[in-house]
Image (cartoon, rainbow, N blue to C red):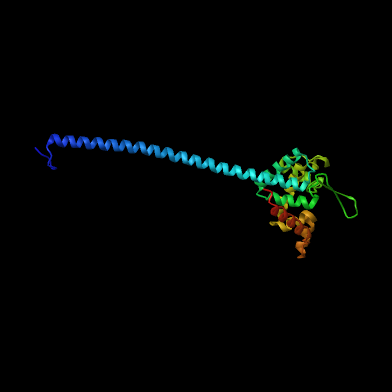
């Protein structure tokens, strides 16, 4: 007796049996291949993640190196290797935490103290102004800013530590940027005092731009030197 395909029952059984075996083998093979593809896909994703992580670490290393060389250039060897390392690490951390260009901070350092960590400010009369260190911060201002970074500034000697001075100086600068919403007025206020800037703005009078222009000039100089 033959089926609809014209095959005898025994032959049809054999054909269907072979077909079933082939299909089962194909399904098993495809299942194995699918697992292998999934495994390869996961390995590829993991590898991509590792490569991206290496890229990030590489960029961080380059940023750190750039800051370190800029600090060394500005300080003209006035900092010990250990002091330079601490300052570089602090600048790197601040720049990432607050999305601020470390070279801009160093431009302020260049303008304020020429990179001298022991600088003591003088007024035009020659009298001591109370401004200290790399960013020429006064003790009273430093003590108000220090708590934001979990620091204690107890004396003027603390402000002669480069990493402390730059931390509180940057905190003050960030506060001014938040107040005025731009670098120009913030830098003028850093130099002239925010009360003086507020009075000029209220009266609609122009701000003195000399300090701002000098800082920007030093910033461009640092950028163009390409420390990498």
Q: Residue at x 30, y 38 (%)?
A: 27
| Left or right, residue 57 beside residue 136 | left
Q: How many marks?
A: 0
Relative to 190, does residue 61 appear above or below in the rendering? above
Relative to 154, does residue 104 appear above or below in the rendering? below
Residue 15 appears at what percent x and percent y?
18, 37
Q: Residue at x 15, y 37 (%)?
A: 12
Q: Residue at x 78, y 60 (%)?
A: 210
Q: Nearer the viewer, residue 100 or 52?
A: 52
| Residue 178 appearing in the image | no
Residue 179 appears at what percent x and percent y?
71, 54
Q: Quadrant of the N terminus?
A: top left
| Residue 80 appearing in the image | yes
Q: Residue at x 69, y 53 (%)?
A: 223
| Left or right, residue 178 beside residue 143 | left
The part of the image, by quadrant, that contains residue 205 is: bottom right
| Left or right, residue 73 beside residue 25 | right
């Amino acid at each position: 007796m033959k089926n609809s395909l014209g095959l005898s029952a025994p032959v049809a059984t054999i054909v269907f049996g072979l077909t079933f075996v082939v299909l089962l083998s194909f399904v098993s093979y495809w299942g194995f291949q699918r697992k292998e593809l999934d495994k390869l896909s996961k390995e590829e994703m993991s590898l991509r993640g590792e490569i991206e992580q290496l890229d990030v670490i590489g960029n961080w290393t380059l940023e750190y190196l750039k800051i370190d060389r800029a600090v060394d250039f500005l300080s003209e060897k006035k900092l010990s290797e250990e002091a330079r390392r601490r300052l570089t690490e602090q600048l790197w951390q601040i720049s990432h935490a607050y999305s601020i260009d470390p070279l801009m901070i160093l431009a302020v350092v260049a303008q304020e103290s020429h990179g001298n960590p022991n600088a003591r400010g003088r007024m035009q009369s020659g009298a001591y102004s109370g401004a200290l260190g790399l960013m020429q911060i006064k003790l009273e201002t430093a003590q108000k800013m220090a708590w934001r970074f979990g620091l204690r500034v107890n004396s003027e000697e603390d402000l002669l530590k480069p990493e402390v001075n730059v931390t509180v100086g940057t905190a003050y600068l960030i506060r001014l940027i938040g107040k005025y919403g731009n670098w120009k007025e913030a830098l003028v206020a850093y130099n002239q005092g925010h009360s003086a800037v507020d009075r000029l703005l209220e009266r609609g009078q122009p701000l003195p731009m000399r300090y701002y222009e000098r800082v920007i000039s030093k910033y461009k100089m640092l950028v163009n030197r390409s420390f990498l």
